[in-house]
């Protein structure tokens, strides 16, 4: 439940309300319960069956009209049953003094009160420290002089916004919008969209001969300080909504694969990976990792993943990126003018899934769309035979295929013995 509450202040308010409820309960337990009828029993003489006042009252005289069977209410009765505003007993000016607490109870209350105050101070101190540490984003420019994605201006366009047209400079074809743009997209603003597309033009590199071997600059980023960037609550809610659909389906149909889902990643771990890779993870990918940090094999079941690939955690993403960059540095057919999306690998790609045979699902950190690598060929940005423009769109397509029995391109979900898997269909 706490995972669904993204606002830290709402969590703090819930904690404060719980502490206040505990304090009120303790105060009420300290009050001694009133014994009803004490005053009446004190007025009745023992053994007589009547109070002393009853013996002094003369016999009633006949009256008309006759009195009710139960008698006529006296002034004291009317006063006692009169409607009066409710005032708690401990706030009433004439409240009787309470019995003092014994030493044991007083020590217990003091200890629990100190624990509650310490917890409150710890929560607020942690919140203040986190705000002071992670409230600012990194704005430093790379030492190499290149304009990297992290330093580009916020000129991101959501291709699902009505009226959007493809930009020839980005190579973003119009058919990329497709059916994966139907839901949860028209209401996004440019600043909060979990799947923006960068429209910045690539630098002109035609001056270098295409057959000249040039190391991949994206695989050799400059050193920078890790900074945990805040996520828009709207992006987190959108990604969590798709994950909730996937989790519900897996729990009901493939419990063995449901148990392979990883625990949430830490924002600090993601920030360190971004700094070491010289890339900025897309917002929807970061929100997805904060929900499930990849997947791990459990009980002999293959880790859950997308389109025939197992999910990868943050550290596995970084280590795989380093391995692929190391292999790419040894390739002799790369030229500076080559297309990074047409090679078998480029350092601006972020691997987040693996099929165990050297091929990976990737997200282009610039274009934000999903692709797949082929260690014996080239990258393709039509996994399953269809374009998938973001990690969020992939989550939604997988959730739709699970619930409707459909497919994502030529990949169709299936369950065998409580374990989730993918089939290739025509």
Image (cartoon, rainbow, N blue to C red):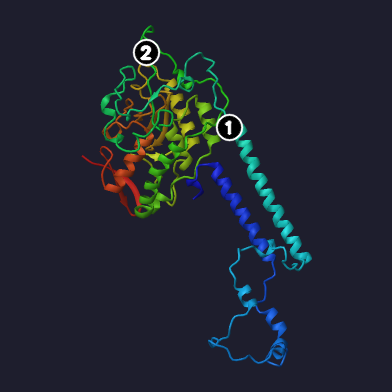
Residue extending furthest toward the front = 64
Q: Nearer the viewer, residue 73 or 60?
A: 60
Q: 29 above or below 323? A: below
Q: 362 above or below 299? A: above
Q: Nearer the viewer, residue 407 or 313?
A: 407
The residue located at (40%, 40%) in the rendering is: 238
The residue located at (46%, 42%) in the rendering is: 291
Q: Which mark is residue 337?
A: 2
Question: Which quarter of the figure is the C terminus placed in?
Answer: top left
Gap between marks 2 and 1, in whole Å? 38 Å
Disc 1 crowd rating (10 Å Cα; few below 14, some 14-19, many 20+) is: some
Residue extending furthest toward the top = 207
Residue 230, position in %: x, y? 52, 33
The residue located at (49%, 36%) in the rendering is: 314
Residue 134 is left or right of residue 116, and the answer is left
Choose the circle earlier in sequence order: 2 or 1. Answer: 1
Residue 144 is left or right of residue 34, and the answer is left
Q: Nearer the viewer, residue 338 or 391?
A: 391
Q: 124 above or below 375? A: below
User: Mark 1 sits on what residue?
Assistant: 134
């Amino acid at each position: 439940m706490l995972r669904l509450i993204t606002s830290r202040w709402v969590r703090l308010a819930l904690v404060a309300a719980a502490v206040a409820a505990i304090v009120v309960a303790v105060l009420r337990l300290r009050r001694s319960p009133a014994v009803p009828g004490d005053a009446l029993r004190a007025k009745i003489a023992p053994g007589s069956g009547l109070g002393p006042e009853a013996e002094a009252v003369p016999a009633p005289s006949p009256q008309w009209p006759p009195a009710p069977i139960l008698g006529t209410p006296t002034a004291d009765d009317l006063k006692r049953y009169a409607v009066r505003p409710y005032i708690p007993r401990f706030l009433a000016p004439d409240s009787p003094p309470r019995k003092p607490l014994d030493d044991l109870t007083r020590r217990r209350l003091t200890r629990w009160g100190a624990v509650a105050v310490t917890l409150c101070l710890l929560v607020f101190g942690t919140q203040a420290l986190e705000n002071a540490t992670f409230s600012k984003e990194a704005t430093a420019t790379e030492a190499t002089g290149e304009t990297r994605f992290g330093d580009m201006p916020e000129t991101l366009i959501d291709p699902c916004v009505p009226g959007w047209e493809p930009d020839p400079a980005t190579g973003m074809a119009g058919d990329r919008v497709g059916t994966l743009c139907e839901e949860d997209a028209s209401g996004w603003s440019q600043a909060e969209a979990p799947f923006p597309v960068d429209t910045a033009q690539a630098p002109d590199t035609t001056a270098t001969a295409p057959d000249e071997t040039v190391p991949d600059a994206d695989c050799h980023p400059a050193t920078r300080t890790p900074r945990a960037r805040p996520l828009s609550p709207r992006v987190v809610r959108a990604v969590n909504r798709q994950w909730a659909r996937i989790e519900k389906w897996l729990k009901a149909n493939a419990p063995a694969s449901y148990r392979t889902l990883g625990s949430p990643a830490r924002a600090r771990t993601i920030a360190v990976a971004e700094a070491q890779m010289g890339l900025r993870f897309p917002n929807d990918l970061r929100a997805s990792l904060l929900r499930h940090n990849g997947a791990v094999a459990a009980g002999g079941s293959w880790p859950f993943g997308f389109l025939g690939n197992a999910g990868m955690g943050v550290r596995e993403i970084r280590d795989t990126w380093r391995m692929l960059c190391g292999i790419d540095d040894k390739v002799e057919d790369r030229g500076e003018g080559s297309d990074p999306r047409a090679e078998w690998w480029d350092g601006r790609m972020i691997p987040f899934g693996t099929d165990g045979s050297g091929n990976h699902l990737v997200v282009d950190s610039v274009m934000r769309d999903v692709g797949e690598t082929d260690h014996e060929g080239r990258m393709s940005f039509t996994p399953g035979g269809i374009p998938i423009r973001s990690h969020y769109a992939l989550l939604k397509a997988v959730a739709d295929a699970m619930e409707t029995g459909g497919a994502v391109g030529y990949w169709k979900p299936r369950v065998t013995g409580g374990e989730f898997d993918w089939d290739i269909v025509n």
